[in-house]
Amino acid sequence: MMLASADRARDLEVFCAVADSGSFSAAGRSLGLTPSAVSRTLDRIEIRLGARLLLRSTRALTLTAEGQAYLAAARRILADLDEAEQAIADQGAPRGRIRVSAALSHGRLCIVPLLGEFVRRYPNILVDINLSDGLVDIAAGQADVAIRGGPMADSALTARRLSDNGRSIVASPDYLARWGVPETPEDLHNHNCLNFSFRRAEPVWPFRRDGVDYALKLRGAIEANSGDTLTELARDGVGIARVGDFSLGNAIADGRLVRLLEAFNPGDREVFHAVFVGGANTPARVRVFVDYLVERMGARRES
């Protein structure tokens, strides 16, 4: 039955080509068929219908009244078939709204700058991005994709690695001129050390001396939930901060900030992942968005 239906659709194409071109030869060239194959197709249609559709002569082909009616129906059926196939194909194309959750600083500095090119590639996708250091519940449908840093907890969600980011202790030249340059990690007890305020932040600053890792609990006058904020405070000479290197921008190169205690830097790196509900039913818009982030962020490591 399926083969017969496919043959009938092909018959419609052949008949329309003959009617439009006015000859078996021209119709055959447009469809990649021989004139004899076109003629046999027209004979088969007329036998099936029990009616003559074309009047053949040595000079021209003329549609009968039945041929005119069949042509109108054939064109309508082929147009409906094309429209149906296009509609189904469009359903698989990346389109629709994708809700993205990212941390404030990392999202603003590392994710947002990539969105312009993404929407140019996929103009039918609407990116709804929410920057917050609060955790969203992907499994509960609060977001389609979350960009998360740090160790990944075991879950049924899919996580794809995007990048890794180093960390540095920094201060402004103005602050150091007023309060002195710490020579050892322990000297930081005498400084205003700016800390993160959210609960999942590390409560201590890690160090490495002579190959041995250890940590110090340091205090300061200000806490913030954003590395971007701590970096700005450090640039303003308020205190010393330990932040992700992506937060620094050009502040080191242009001299607004100075790295401190690099000899004691343990070299720890924060890994960022795209987290989403994976599987065969993952929407195309989610797959292409995550693939794009892996492409762009995997090509560079945030130093």
Image: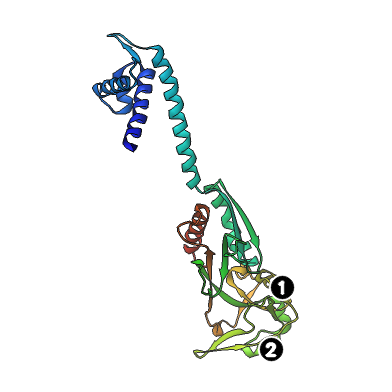
- Please, which colouring scheme is shown? rainbow
- Pointer 1 or 2: first along the chain: 2
Q: Of 5 and 109, which appears nearest the observer?
A: 5
**For residue 26, what is the image quadrant?**
top left
What residue sits 38% from the left and 12% below the top?
64
Residue 33: which quarter of the image?
top left
Residue 20 pos. (x, y %) = 39, 19
Secondary structure, mark 2, is helix
* Above or below, comparing residue 221 to residue 28 in the picture: below
Expressed as whole percent of the image width and height from the top left, the position of residue 125 reads 56, 49
Which secondary structure lies at badge 1? helix
Amino acid carrying label 2: it is His
Compared to residue 20, the image places residue 93 above or below, namely below
Amino acid at circle 1: Leu
Where residue 41 sits in the image (x, y, percent)?
29, 24
Choose between 184 and 284: the one closer to the eye: 284
Q: Nearer the viewer, residue 99 or 207?
A: 99
Residue 208 located left or right of residue 175: left
* Disc number placed over residue 189 in the picture, else none: 2
- Which residue sits at x=49%, y=52%? 284
Using the rendered image of the protein, determine whether residue 67 is visible from the camera's viewpoint.
yes
Q: Which residue corresponds to mark 1?
A: 233
Q: Badge 1: how crowded within 10 Å, few (<14), some, or many (20+)?
A: some
In front here: 237 or 152?
152
- Residue at the image point whose x is 71% and y is 79% from the top: 239
* Left/right of residue 17 with respect to residue 109 in the rendered view: left
- Report the residue at 34% width, 26% height from top: 11
